[in-house]
Image (cartoon, grey):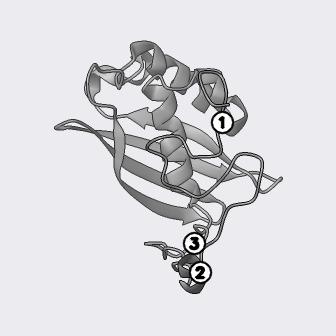
Amino acid sequence: MTGPGRRGNSRPPGRHDTRRPGGSPVRTAARRSAPPPPPPSPARPLVPPGPQRPTDLFAERLLAVLSGRRPVHWMLRHTAGQAYDDLAWLTERSPLRTPGACPVVHDIGYYVPRQGAVEAFARISTGDRLRAMAFRLERGPDQRWRCTAVELGGPSLRRPSER
């Protein structure tokens, strides 16, 4: 008896696949002879990226804090000396917190004055505006890089003691 609330042995209208609930799919001779399609090849090889340079890593970290995407204390264990205080002072003035476009690192350059120290600069673009950020990295006795100085371009962004 088939009617409302009862199922017959036929497929529901509009269903075109051969799977049946609770059972194995019904195979036909035509489907058995066709080989399965090859898996799609990836556009890029699945090779993990190489290690990121400390200058690139710290430029992104500093930008995340200065733009307000991360809190200042996120950089506490990645800074040494006066750098954390300078970063907190710059963040209070929120120079890179602008409505609209999110700031991104446009370009990075660096100079190695001695073994275990790197002086770097980054160009930060926010829409059509470009700013400069400079920072110094030093490798500690534990072989970890730490930011020891940070500055953001512009005369209005210098601490009163530096003017």
In the rendered picture of this protein, how many numbered marks are placed on residues? Answer: 3
| x, y percent for residue 98 | 30, 21
| Up/down of 142 relative to 13, above or below | below
| x, y percent for residue 94 | 39, 18
Few, some or many residues within 10 Å of mark 1 (<14, 14–19, 20+)? many
Q: Nearer the viewer, residue 67 or 84?
A: 67
| x, y percent for residue 154 | 27, 30
Secondary structure at badge 2 equals helix
Q: Which of 123 and 119 is in front in this view?
A: 123
Secondary structure at badge 3 equals loop
| x, y percent for residue 63 | 45, 35
Disc number placed over residue 145 in the picture, else none: none
Q: Which of marks 2 and 3 is in front?
A: 2
Name the amino acid, label 3. Leu
Tell me the distance, in whole angstroms, between the alpha carbons under discs 1 and 2: 69 Å
Q: Which of marks 1 and 2 is in front?
A: 2
Q: Is residue 6 visible?
A: yes
Q: Is residue 5 left or right of residue 160?
A: right
Name the amino acid, label 1. Thr
- Upstream in sequence: badge 1 or badge 3: 3
Residue name at image x 59 percent, y 32 percent: 83
Extreme-right residue of the structure: 142
| Up/down of 120 relative to 47, above or below | above
Secondary structure at badge 1 equals loop
Residue name at image x 57 percent, y 72 percent: 46
Quadrant in which the C terminus is drawn: top left
Q: Nearer the viewer, residue 51 or 122?
A: 51
Q: Mark 2 points at which residue?
A: 29
Q: Name the residue under label 1.
A: 79
Q: Name the residue under label 3.
A: 46
CB-based contact (under 8 Å), mark 1 and mark 2? no
- Upstream in sequence: badge 2 or badge 3: 2
